[in-house]
Image: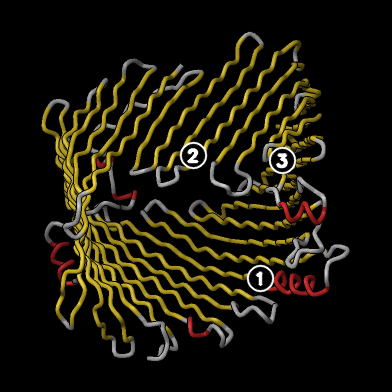
Amino acid sequence: MLFASALLFCGTASAQQMPADSVDADTEAAIPPDEQRDAGPGQLSAGFERNVNTFLWDLGGTFRLEENGWRIDADERFLRTLIRTDRNTIKDEQSFRLNTARTLTRGFAVTASFSSFIFSDNRALGLNDLSTNKALAGVQWDALPVLEIQPMAGVSFDNQQGILDRGFMYSGRARLHDLLIGRTAAQAELYSSAEFIDPRFQAEHRGSADLLATVGDNSINHTQLLIRQVRREFYLPFDSLFEARTGVTNQIESREERIVTLSNTLNYRIMRSLELQAAVDLTQRDIARARQRHDPGNDNPFFDTDISEFHLNGNMQLRYENSRGTRGMVRLELNERDESHAINPFEGASPVSIARQEMLETQKNNSIQQTQLAFDISQALGSRDTLSLSASTVKMQYDTPSEENYDDRDELWVLAGLRWMHRFSPQFQAGVSADLNMRHTVFIFAERSANNTWNRVLRLRPMTEIRVGHGFVSRNTAEVVANYTVYDFETATLAQRSFSLRQLTLSDSTTMHLGGDFWTEINLHLRFYERGELRWSAFTVRPVQYFDERTLSISMLRVGEAVRASVGFRLFEQRRYAYEGREKARSGLLRSYGPTGSLRLRFSQATDIIAEGWYQLTSENDGPQRSTPNLSLRVVWNL
């Protein structure tokens, strides 16, 4: 396979991925792209898609207006998903948001907002029917040139599990912006909201502060502090046994999350061609789940739980770039995460249930330490060649303090890649890339050490690109992949067996201008891969399965200002083989083919209609043929 790839590279193999510094302005796509236009003050869109037995409707719109002292901002989105099976499932999601403001005097305005969210799913999966509607009114006051205050009050309607709760709510926001303190720019924001929807209570409080400081002539330092606390309460599905034992019909569960994050990033230019970047990030996250009532009579009762997570991330990297085409980067990164779980026993719970749940929660406690070292260097060799080399290694350590958890493990990743690109002429480029990925997983305890493995992946990928003017582009690649997974303690008595996956992929993509508005595009993709049982010590493979996949698609395109259309044909065929001794015997055949088409109509500078579809005929092992129409339709109207 390696020899075949080398021959293909010398002949017709071609590049689909090239270093940016080796490509000039002539390497843009051959087919003219769609013209991008300003959407104006708003946009309406409608979409429909069918894929096999899944139907999706997508309706949406946006509107923005700022005129004569008025500011209006609105968004609407409706999604419906229908899956046709023996029991059709329908899921609907609708969200709407409207914000308005009317300036009365300089620095003072009255504001109002309305938001709505509706969700329904006919599958009985917990919270499968809910809606929230919030209406607020207030004022916006620019107390200072750098200080904006916005208090609001209103009502909230929240429907869950067929129970409608309503009540008073408020929100308040204070924003400090564009404050200069010497050479430091400061921004800060405080936000608080609460919903008193008896018998439930929901709230969100958050604050943030940003400092962007220029230190000396070469350094910029960014410090950020974020504090956020969110409380949500929701009804649980009805439980007749719980009601009989406790007398509570509508059980309420609360979830409260608290996050504190402190981060700092420093960019320092050591010299003109050398830059240092260093960052550190600390996050403390606490989650508390609780219920108003508990059920001591349940053999497996629910206990209130607390989850605590601490994250520490730090990285430092050096970047180098000079005028002679040399680029380089060295990066060191350290990450640590500690997670702990605990329960809060309630009065009346049996000691056996408490001990069992405490043991289960303790087994979830874990800590992860990860270290990464990476470098990347590329060099332009004259005006025609670019050579790049990259490598990285990652060491991960996963520990669990519980004696009942045997998932402790160490993992080591090693990745390396070498790429070369040569520009023979403005019309012809060629290159080759080679990659090595290795991963070693070692479980610490004997109970799971049978899963210790080495995974090694080697890849060789030659490539070429031929471009004649702006009307002909041909890209070709040939890729050889060898994937070996080896168990450290493999024996004949174990179910695990080392295995290999070897693959050869050939692809060709050609686009040609036929004249006028007409183009043609041909894509050919061949993939041959074999899975086998591996004996790494002797480096021998016993083939188990072989696959032969072929994909061909041909399209004729018309590209105009008002109409972009294409018609084509796509064929996919997969032949599967099993081995009887050393001989291959076909075990399966999957064939799928059919016409394809797309159409974009531009009626005006404001309206587009986009349609795509394909008709798929599928058969397996010469069995009955299945036909599946697939369609995607979208209408866009720019206001």
Mark 3, residues whose alpha carbon is within 10 Å: few (<14), some, or many (≥20)?
A: some
Three-letter amino acid code at disc 3?
Thr
Residue at 70% from the left image edge and 58% from the top image edge: 282
Q: Is residue 317 left or right of residue 52?
A: right
Residue at 51% from the left image edge and 70% from the top image edge: 394
Q: Is residue 65 left or right of residue 557?
A: right
Three-letter amino acid code at disc 1?
Ser
Quadrant where the image shows the N terminus: bottom left
Image coordinates of residue 440 in percent, x first then y, are 46, 78
Disc 2 element: strand
Disc 3 element: strand
> How far apart are the alpha carbons under marks 3 and 1?
37 Å
| Label number found at residue 90 | 2
Is there a contact, CB below 8 Å, between mark 3 and mark 1? Answer: no
Considering only vertical position in the picture, is 504 above or below 421?
A: below
Give the foreground label among 2 and 1: 2
| Label number found at residue 345 | none
Mark 1, residues whose alpha carbon is within 10 Å: few (<14), some, or many (≥20)?
A: some
- Sequence order check: which comes first, mark 2 or mark 3? 2
Q: Is residue 474 left or right of residue 215?
A: left
Three-letter amino acid code at disc 2?
Ile
For label 3, the residue is: 184
Image coordinates of residue 152 in percent, x first then y, are 78, 25
Is there a contact, CB below 8 Å, between mark 2 and mark 1? Answer: no
Considering only vertical position in the picture, is 538 above or below 207?
A: below
Disc 1 element: strand
The quarter of the picture where residue 156 lies is top right
- Sequence order check: which comes first, mark 2 or mark 1? 2
Image coordinates of residue 590 in percent, x first then y, are 21, 57
For label 1, the residue is: 367
